[in-house]
Image: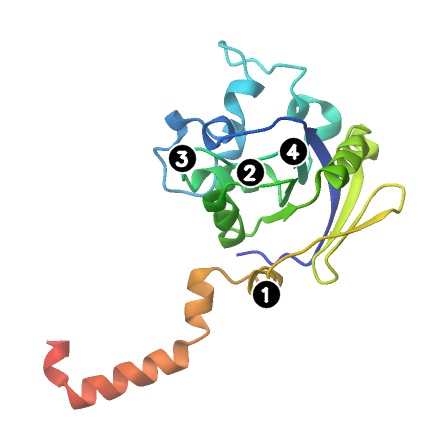
Amino acid sequence: MEKFTKLTGVAAPLPMINVDTDMIIPKQFLKTIKRSGLGKNLFDEMRYDDNGNEIPDFVLNKPAYRNAQILVSGDNFGCGSSREHAPWSLLDFGIRCVIAPSFADIFYNNCFKNGILPIRLPQEDVDKLMSDAERGANATVTIDLENQEITGPDGGCIKFEVEEFRKHCLLNGLDDIGLTLQKGDAINDFEAKRAASQPWLSL
């Protein structure tokens, strides 16, 4: 997966609590097992009307936020069913970081496994970033994972916490497969020794 080191981009405000995974990517779009192509259906029922036309007032349809890479939202983001399509759709749209006071556990874990950085912050810090995000195209925020800092458009700095192992994986672009491949030599050595000592297992 793509490494996450430092991200500078527009932050989009989504001041809603309990944004569940069916809101993020509705169930009718879960037929695919591909990670690409889901961005156009991100927040589908809020982005489009019954005729498939964009709803102008929805934040990601506004010109200033069409290329947003950071999403600032409310408490309990990603609740509901455990669909991994939710982070897939965010990533395919271009969102690399979601900031909220809290996340549903499964969604939170799935973000790290797909190269998205979910950041938990106290409500007062989220409120400040939400206010910054409402500036539209001027809502440029920098996320520095190495130093665990968020720098707002006015230069203000907010520190955030992230588990060391998850940080290591994001900085190095390591998902579960990548972590396994790091042990490739040891795996190959084990398989060779097993084939030599127990050749009947290879039949």
- Quadrant in which the C terminus appears: bottom left
Give the structural element (helix, strand or loop) at label 1: helix
Task: Please tell me whether mark 2 or mark 4 is closer to you in this view.
Answer: 4
- For the residues labelled 4 and 3, the Cα–Cα distance comes to 18 Å
CB under 8 Å between callouts 4 and 3? no
Q: What is the number of the mark on residue 81?
A: 3
Find residue 126 and report its horizontal and vertical position in percent. Answer: 73, 38
- For the residues labelled 1 and 2, the Cα–Cα distance comes to 20 Å
Q: What is the number of the mark on residue 90?
A: 2
- For the residues labelled 4 and 1, the Cα–Cα distance comes to 27 Å
Q: Residues within 10 Å of mark 2 (few under 14, many from 20)?
A: many
Label 1: which residue? Answer: 172
Q: Residues within 10 Å of mark 1 (few under 14, many from 20)?
A: some
Task: Please tell me whether mark 4 or mark 1 is closer to you in this view.
Answer: 4
| Sequence-first disc among 4 and 3 | 4
| Sequence-first disc among 2 and 3 | 3
Q: Amino acid at mark 1?
A: Asn
Q: Residue at x 68, y 59 (%)?
A: 5
**Rendering quarter of residue 35:** top left
Task: Please tell me whether mark 3 or mark 1 is closer to you in this view.
Answer: 3
Label 4: which residue? Answer: 73
Q: Amino acid at mark 4?
A: Ser
Give the structural element (helix, strand or loop) at label 2: helix
Find residue 99 and report its horizontal and vertical position in percent. Answer: 66, 41
- For the residues labelled 2 and 3, the Cα–Cα distance comes to 16 Å
Q: Amino acid at mark 3?
A: Ser
